[in-house]
Image: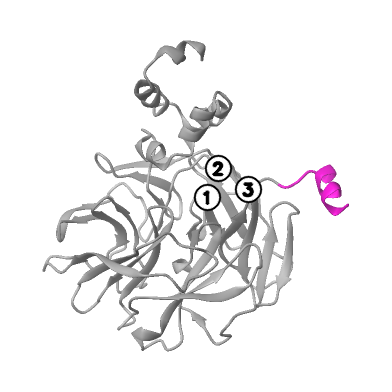
Amino acid sequence: MAHLKNLPWELIEEILSRVPPKSLVRFRTVSKQWNALFDDKTFINNHKMTFRFILATKSKIYSVSIDPVIVVRELPLGTPGLESLELNNLVDCNELLVCVKNNGAVVWNPWLGQSRWIQPSLNHSPMVFDGIVYDNKKYKMVAFSGLWKIYDFSSDVWIDHKSKSTNSNTNVINVQTAVCLNGNLYWVCFREKTDPLCYHIHKFGFSNSIWVRFCNLPFGRNHDGDALVLGVFRGDRFSLLKQCMVTKKIEVFVTENKINHENGDDVVWKNFMTFSSPNLPDLVETVKFSNPSYFIEGKRLVVCSRDNTGHAWIYILGDSKLISKTRIECVVDPWPLHCTFVPSLVPVPAPCRREEQAELQV
């Protein structure tokens, strides 16, 4: 690498943006500047192998890149735990992906090709895998199976967890609305399903492992068919997408400031985008009523959803109008699962060796 020191930094970045992600991990030790570059979201987004959506059918998994054109690539199924799919859900955990199956889950970094099989707890109730919380490279899985359960990645152990909440009657609308931000999980919840004013966000934190009401939402759902999807904006804030099933109007709100995970009292929402043109698509199909996946890039809203025939579409909106719509033709099976994904060089957490576990118990 010594010969690269004489090159302009911009050229070094361009060269590294073409290096396969698995190789980038080995280059972290070259210098502090390189290590910082690999943590830079701008570098990751500009990498030539970056993708932003994952689609999974009964037999295949695909990545979807957006810029400069939409490119769909089939991902290899040699990943341990994913040789046979039969997935029930995809859970985007910010820098990792949870692929949920009937008999467990696979924690996966598709950018690095790393994975880890998570065996469910011993009780025979189906488990709902909600996501991953983390702090200082320590990771836990949050799931529900009759009661809340916490899986510790280091010890490879499930622990029954008694739910603590400021409101035990709070209902989670949809586990797919859970998002991971700053190592915590956040859900859209409601007190009264038919009252939009009663929608808010609940949080589960890594450090104290309790559920607390975090902040209010700027709006809720007026109809069961409305899209209402919580997301992460600019890496440290919330976004909230809503589409009215009656008018097709799409609104996107974001929080003004970075989210302070300790206190949601100072959260302020502002309208970021509104689309009300007559040609807007239905982002929630009326067969399975699944929510769309989306991300915000600059002043564009990029959405992945399915139509009423089960085909996946990518919609790009901006300047108060629908800019483009693209049907994903190469997906072999209808009704694919889909989610956003932020590529990263974060390794899938491995269990501690026995010697390390013994040291932790001393």
* Residue designated by label 3: 116
Query: Residue at 49% of width from left, 28% of height from top?
Result: 34
Residue type at numbered disc 2: Val
Question: Which badge, 1 or 3, is on the more N-terminal residue?
Answer: 1
Query: Residue at 72% of width from left, 71% of height from top?
Result: 160
Do labels 1 and 2 touch, CB within 8 Å?
Answer: yes
Which structural element holds mark 2?
loop
- What x and y, as percent, mark residue 304? 31, 57
Question: Which badge, 3 or 2, is on the more N-terminal residue?
Answer: 3
Front disc: 1 or 3: 1
Instruction: Decide if residue 308 is in sight here.
Output: no
Which structural element holds mark 1?
loop
Which structural element holds mark 3?
strand
Q: Is residue 97 above or below residue 245?
A: above
Question: Which badge, 1 or 2, is on the more N-terminal residue?
Answer: 1
* Residue designated by label 2: 346
Quarter assignment of residue 204: bottom right
Tell whether 70 sits left or right of 73: left
- What x and y, as percent, mark residue 209? 65, 68
Q: Which numbered dot is residue 224?
A: none
